Every structure is written in C-alpha cells, then in structure tokens.
C-alpha cells in the first residue's frame, strides 16, 4: 500500500461513515490498521488476485454466547458507536442464517458473518472496497 492509496482509503472511509476521525495506518506490505481516534477497529488488506486491485476491511466483534442474545439491535448499536454514525443499521439476510448485512441508510456496507469458536461467538464484519470506489470522480 503506497501513500496515495492510504490517503484515498482515508478519504473514502471518512466520507462513507461521515466521520473525519477515521484514519488508515499502513503496516508492513499490503496491510493497514483502521482507527477512529485511538480505537483500533480492524485490519485492511489488499486483494489484487484477479488483476483488479481491491481492499477488504475486516473487523472482529466479540459478542455474548447467551442464547437470548439479539444480534441485530446489539450489532447496530455497536457499529453506530464505533463509527459515530447513527445511520448504520444491521439487518437479517433473506435465506441466510449464518450472516447479517450492514447498511448506512440504503447503501450496502458489508456482511457480518457469525463465527463460533471454542464456545465463543463473534461476528466478522467485512467491508469490500473496490479500486473504483477510491476514484474521486466515481464518488457521489
């Protein structure tokens, strides 16, 4: 990830979430961390496998293993607080029980996949970012 890509990713994520406090901090190679203030939200990786360069933001959210846990309202509240955006909403997916979808208003953000490992439940929020999303001419 070069400096220009990091700047474009910063600008894209700040605009997408309506939060100027979001910043992308590069690590070694094609990996970066995404922060809001001092809060490390997750990891951003490069995918240029198919000749098209894209990015994937991945955020792990630990949740209760209690069977009465309600993922939709809890994850909505969590993501709203983390990204400081009251327009984020989490909804169930038609025909899928292993994942949920996240939106800002009507704009699709990404998928939250449920993961159960060693008695612990978490959701993995994955937000794909295409190279064309980073083009200032292509943004709304």
Image (spheres, rainbow, N blue to C red):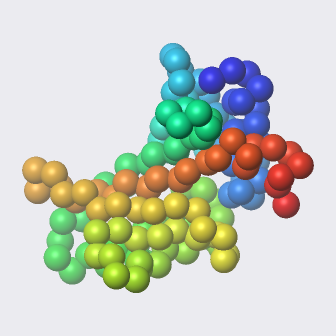
Residue 40 visible in the current orientation: no
Residue 130 visible in the current orientation: yes
Q: Position of residue 124 (x, y in %)?
A: 37, 54
Q: Position of residue 101 (x, y in %)?
A: 47, 70
* 45 or 120, nearer to the observer: 45
On-image quarter of the N terminus? top right
Please tell me whether residue 140 is drawn above or below residue 42 in the rendered image: below
Q: How many marks?
A: 0
On-image quarter of the C terminus? bottom right
Q: Residue at x 60, y 56 (%)?
A: 83
Please tell me whether residue 26 is drawn above or below residue 17 in the rendered image: above
Q: Residue at x 48, y 37 (%)?
A: 43
Left or right, residue 119 beside residue 106? left
Q: Residue at x 55, y 74 (%)?
A: 89
Q: Residue furthest left?
A: 118
Q: Position of residue 17 (x, y in %)?
A: 68, 58
Please tell me whether residue 76 is drawn above or below residue 9 in the rendered image: below
* 38 or 128, nearer to the observer: 128
Left or right, residue 129 beside residue 12? left
Left or right, residue 74 beside residue 35? left
Q: Position of residue 30 (x, y in %)?
A: 54, 24
Q: Residue at x 66, y 77 (%)?
A: 106
Please tell me whether residue 36 is drawn above or below residue 19 in the rendered image: above
Q: Residue furthest right?
A: 137
Q: Residue furthest front?
A: 50
């Amino acid at each position: 990830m070069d400096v220009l890509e990091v700047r474009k990713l910063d600008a894209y994520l700040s605009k997408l979430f309506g939060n100027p406090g979001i910043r992308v901090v590069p690590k070694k190679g094609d990996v970066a961390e995404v922060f809001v203030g001092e809060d490390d939200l997750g990891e951003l990786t490069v995918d240029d496998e198919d000749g098209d360069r894209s990015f994937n933001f991945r955020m792990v959210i630990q949740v209760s293993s209690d069977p009465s846990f309600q993922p939709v309202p809890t994850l909505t509240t969590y993501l709203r607080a983390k990204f400081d955006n009251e327009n984020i909403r989490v909804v169930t997916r038609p025909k899928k029980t292993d994942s949920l979808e996240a939106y800002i208003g009507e704009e699709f953000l990404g998928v939250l996949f449920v993961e159960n490992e060693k008695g612990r439940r978490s959701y993995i929020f994955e937000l794909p970012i295409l190279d064309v999303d980073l083009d200032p001419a292509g943004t709304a």
